[in-house]
Image (cartoon, grey):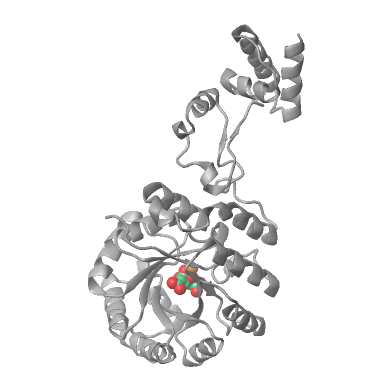
Amino acid sequence: MPIRRLSIIESTLREGEQFAGAHFTLAQRRQIAHAVDDFGVEHIELTTPVASPTAQRSCREIAALPLRAIVLTHTRCVVDDVLLAIDCGVGGVDLLFGTSSWLRSNSHGLELDDIVVAAADCIALVRAAGLEVRFSCEDSFRTEPADLLRILAAVAALGVDRVGLADTVGIATPAQVTALITQLRDAVDCDIEFHAHNDNGCAVANALAALQAGATHIDTTVLGIGERNGIVPLSGLIARLHTVQPELVDHYALERLAALDAMVAGILDVDIPLTAPITSPYAFHHKAGMHTKAVLGDPRSYEPFAPERFGIERRLLVNHQLVGRHAVRQRAAALGIAGDDTWLRRVTAEVKRHAGERLLRDDEVDALLRASAGA
Ligand code: HCA
Ligand code: CU
């Protein structure tokens, strides 16, 4: 089914802070909030102000920034926590409850009806404050579907703006996500949020399945950071949607994505993962001769989308043994060197001979080309 709506809930300042290597200063939190806002996300989710005095200060400060996005804070279904969240000036509250039998027996010990009662008080408080309210079930995919639907239908009837499903331990398959969201779509009238962990590498695929089955909101973080190996990376979601339904992501500042990932990687002192869609340093590098030949003819031969749309340049590599003569000719032309086909074949063979031992540096390739021009 075509996706009709998408809102991104950018949770780098909540789920992202749960990444083992993350600690943001207040100034960095402001910087990240502005950057994701400039990118154009619809919501920014913050750590609960109950976490620490600094978390509370951050929540108040970020809620007061002149941002286009609605600022939300993650909050347990505890009345005092909800009152503090409201007092911090946020635009909405993301309530959550553990509903799997694991969490019901090992965490809070409540029965289903008690969960709905606890949620009802908190939902009423947020609604009375005129703020957006969401209720989500942690570990939705290890909760009995009948229990899950019963709780979410009950909170939807209490007037929440959104209900959420969370694949807390990253075990769901796209088919399971499709099935559960389809059932939920029939059970509630409100918006549906989906939060996907990436333990099995399926977070982006699951987010797409959720949207196609009728979810409206997807949680992301920059670089996908979060508990364990994280959740849906913003760049992964954008790549996925740009491929299937580009009009859904066209209004975001796509040309800012690479700088956003680089900024957060810099703050965390990590590299952008080399497997990251779009923003990997290698996402638009072409190497083998067959590839570079076709890309020189038409980049679409080996590119799912144009790097220019993201403000990134493609590169054709000539420093290796898989090099083809078309790429060599192009590099030579950039140096102002041209020659006939015999020359081109000879210099390509020369590059291959040297690069058979190791990858060459760019200046080494250029020296070979210059030397062959003089020969
Ligand atoms: C957490 C759990 C959570 C919540 C997701 C949500 C999860 O770390 O508090 O609020 O929908 O993965 O279940 O991130
Ligand atoms: Cu999570």
Which residue is drawn at the image coordinates 37% and 59% (left, top)? 172
User: As displayed, is residue 68 above or below residue 51?
Assistant: above
Query: Where's residue 95, x and y in %?
Result: 44, 80
Image quarter where the N terminus lies is bottom left
- 117 in relation to 319, above or below: below
Apparent side of residue 362 relative to residue 112 in the rendered image (left or right): right
Residue 365 seen in the figure: yes
Where's residue 6, x and y in %? 39, 63
Q: Position of residue 318 (x, y in %)?
A: 64, 26
Query: On the image, which quarter does residue 248 sit in?
Result: bottom left
Along the line of sight, which residue is nearer the eye, 135 or 343? Answer: 343
Residue 256: percent from the left, percent from the top? 58, 55
Residue 261 falls in image quadrant: bottom right
User: Image quarter for residue 131?
Assistant: bottom left
Closer to us: 236 or 243: 243
Residue drawn at 44 percent across, 91 percent down: 129
**Quadrant containing the C terminus in the rendered view:** top right
| Residue 361 appears in the figure | no
| Residue 176 against residue 122 in the figure, above or below | above
Q: Give the left or right position of residue 326, taking residue 305 as reference.
A: right
The tally of labels here is 0
Image point (55%, 75%), residue name: 46
Q: Which residue sits at x=57%, y=20%? A: 326
Q: Nearer the viewer, residue 46 or 311?
A: 311
Please tell me whether residue 351 is drawn above or below residue 95 in the rendered image.
above
